[in-house]
Image (cartoon, rainbow, N blue to C red):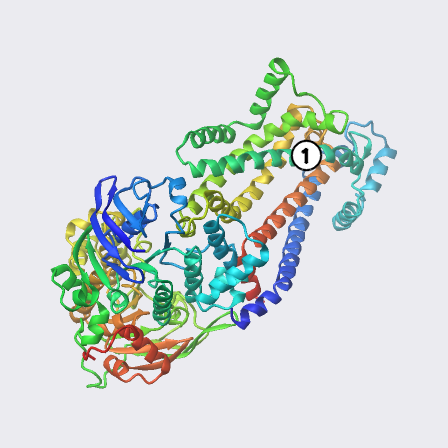
Amino acid sequence: MTVLLSALTVLGPSGTMVEPIDAEIAPGATLALIGESGSGKTLTAKSIVGLLPRGFRATGAVSVAGQDLPVTRAGDDAAWRRARGRSVSLLLQDPFTSLTPVHRCGDQIAWTIEAAQGRRLTRGARRKAVEERLAEVNLPARVADAFPHELSGGMRQRVAIAAALASDPQLLIADEPTTALDASNQAEILDLLRRIQLERRLSVILISHDLGVVRGRTDQVLVMRDGKVVERGATAAVLAAPEHPYTRALIEADPVVAARTGARIAEESADGSAEVEALLVCERVTKAFGARTVLDAVDLSIAPGAIVGIVGESGSGKSTLARCIAGLEREDAGSIVLGGAALAAGRASRTPGQMQIVFQDPYSSLNPMMSIGAILAEALGVAGREASEVPTMLEMVGLPAEFARKRPAELSGGQRQRVAIARALAPEPRLLICDESVSALDVSVQADILALLARLRDELGIAILFISHDLAVVRMIADTVTVMWDGRVVEAGPCHEVLEHPAHEYTRLLVAAAMRENAVPADGKD
Amino acid sequence: MSIADTRARASRLRPLGRMVAVRVLGVLGVLFVLSILVFAMMYLAPGDIVKNLLGNRPTNPDVIAAVREQYRLDDPVVIQYLSWLKGFVTGDLGMSIRLQQPVADAIGDRVGITLALCLLAFVVAVISAVPLGVRSAVKAGGWVDRTGNAMSILGLSAPTFAVGLLLLYVFAYYLPIFPVYGGGDGGVDTLRHLVLPAVTLALGLGAIIVKLTRTAMLRELESDYVTFARSRGLGERLVRRIALRNAAIPIVTGASLVLTFLVGGTVLAETTYALPGLGTLLQDSVLFKDIAVVQSLTLLVAVVIAAIALIADLTYILLDPRVRRQMGAAS
């Protein structure tokens, strides 16, 4: 029942994408593949199910329980038909896109069962089989009749797990299975996978960029970088004593590790020492979309030069609050005061010099048709500054002046986010709002951007409102943190206090998620 | 699956009914405005209004008085409009001066063949274009894709009358298997007569549907759920069916928009093949300044286009459970 990868290699149009990988996974064991984007971990996964993109092919061999998979025949669906599902299944990252939106969840699970058995089931048998699979992932039978959009992200990912396992494969490849989920769902899904794996003696390849996910849940780990395995070994040993400098850097950049050691990127600004007048004060800001209240009398205060974090999961209202402050949404009630002057709702009452916002996705927030120089020149122009300051702006965010001639498509995610920050700084705002600005980035890049934000705060004296779903990230940079849940502020205070003594139940959940606690045996560090 | 969801599902039909009602009211509003414009045609047509309404009939004071009476030309404009609208709503569309018969009869005689033509053209276009579009997307860059692409460029760029004339020429001289003139004697014979005009119309319509289907399918085949389905061992036919079901949403919306293309196309196709349908009726009436007929046909076309748009919206709701859910949430 063992899974063997022998010299598995992925070749792309421009040469070798993944250098030969050898690995052995026992039944019930988990192999972790960790690395950042571009490391080749997803290509490796796709090569094992024969779903490499056009122009890519694999060499080497993969055997599952003594049976060879046709890995060298990517795209040959006839050859793969018997292997996919029955020997190996692939679970994808995003449960919002991996299920078809117009089919009921029960049908999607039933398809896998029927494909594996090679025959159609009667209605009754089909229903019974689907309900058994749903029960295995702790979902009630009625989910079978639901469409994916009627379920929460965590429930969708359970349906996807049920669908992936309905063919009883011997190897499951889980590609970032919790990255798209809220912190409170992540641990649940990982623990569910672990339980099923042990019950079924299933071999698992768990792909992640997140060391917190890998720690305590996997047996072996391969650290990949640029298509090469740079380090391998037992997970606990590698994480405790990494040999390769890249592994060490990854661990250092990991917010979870930082959360446990208390390491910070930004200096904590003197805390309540002087009675400075707040730069921004929000009082009882309320906003409803239709019948749904998204913001329920939210208070927030930001001192000049402070970094204030807001944590909460999707739907908690954190982004809506940011958008109300920036004037992109109109609050229904409450007041927003900046530097002593009340701001009316909406964009018309804002000037670019008051506040700027940096969004999550640097791929869509920059116009792909414009050069970086033109993007920055435009923002400078709006602020009445000269285009000749473009090199200064680039230098300020740590990019060389030559980047002015490039277009967004030529830049990496981190470089694009630096450009987005430079653009936001062009009108010299007093407040910079970062709405999940580092969430789409790799951990090491994330750490760089956080360091950049901390440096900008120190040099320019601007205040930063830093919004994230991950408390571990927020605590690396923010002075104070506000925890939001269901449109309300449930807790607020200095970062270390909230982390060490969470008062609200939801905050305790977030802290546990930030430390990835339930997976980790106590190791005396915290 | 919260309680709210269950409630939303239970009350799903209510907002649906309300949405239909709102849309129908909106359509009625548009038609009302349009009817004013159509009514104004009488006055906007150059020349004396009585003369225009009389056409080439010999005039004498009695005839003029009769026309003034029929159109209430001596009443205020509002009364004229209302009486005209009342006639229109109750089916009294006035008299055709060219045909010397009630407009309702003139239209009634011809509407069948035009409807049959449009329906046939649409069916031919859909059953040939959708599979071709799917095939083109599945084997993108293959010979089916390239041939289909060349054909749809041809279909899109060739004007309907040119295609009509070409087919006419080929089937009249070289391959006389389909009749090229007239509407036939009803039943199967009429169907045979409709084949060439329908193909003429279907070529342009089909070209757009091929493009729509190909683009929509390509996008769906790239999506995560297709990768996930394949990785679970689902057969390629099932995977394609799932993708097509998702692609159906943009295809249906797009196809119903181009359906209106048929309305203009029938005039050309019917003229080319001398079919006694509404298209030829409209053309002749415009040339003859047969105002009553032109007014009626214009409004009829407007009603048809509004109905198509409404049906397209309803189909969209039927195809996409997410839209149904949103409507439930809005209640």
Residue B197 drawn above or below residue A15: above
Name the spot of residue B213 as percent of width and height, x first: 49, 40
User: How many neighbours does mark 1 have within 10 angstroms: few (below 14), some (14-19), or many (20 or more)?
Assistant: few
Name the spot of residue A309 as percent of width and height, x first: 28, 74
Which quarter of the image is occupied by the C terminus of chain B? bottom right
| Farthest top residue in view | B173
Label 1 secondary element:
loop
Residue placed at 19% from the left, 72% from the top? Answer: A461
**Subunit of label 1:** B
On screen, residue A52 versus residue B288, left or right, reads left
Which quarter of the figure has residue A467?
Answer: bottom left
Residue placed at 71% from the left, 36% from the top? Answer: B294
> Which residue is disc 1 drawn over?
B46
Residue A494 drawn above or below residue B325: below
Which quarter of the figure has residue A238?
Answer: bottom left
Residue placed at 20% from the left, 68% from the top? Answer: A236
Kindly tell me whether residue A252 is visible in this rendering. Answer: no
Q: Nearer the viewer, residue A222 or B211?
A: A222
Amino acid marked by disc 1? Pro
Residue A76 drawn above or below residue A512: above
On screen, residue A455 versus residue B23, left or right, reads left
Name the spot of residue B312 as percent of width and height, x first: 59, 48
On screen, residue B51 versus residue A408, left or right, reads right
Q: Nearer the viewer, residue A44 or A482?
A: A44
On screen, residue A500 versus residue B117, left or right, reads left
Name the spot of residue B239 as percent of width and height, x first: 46, 46
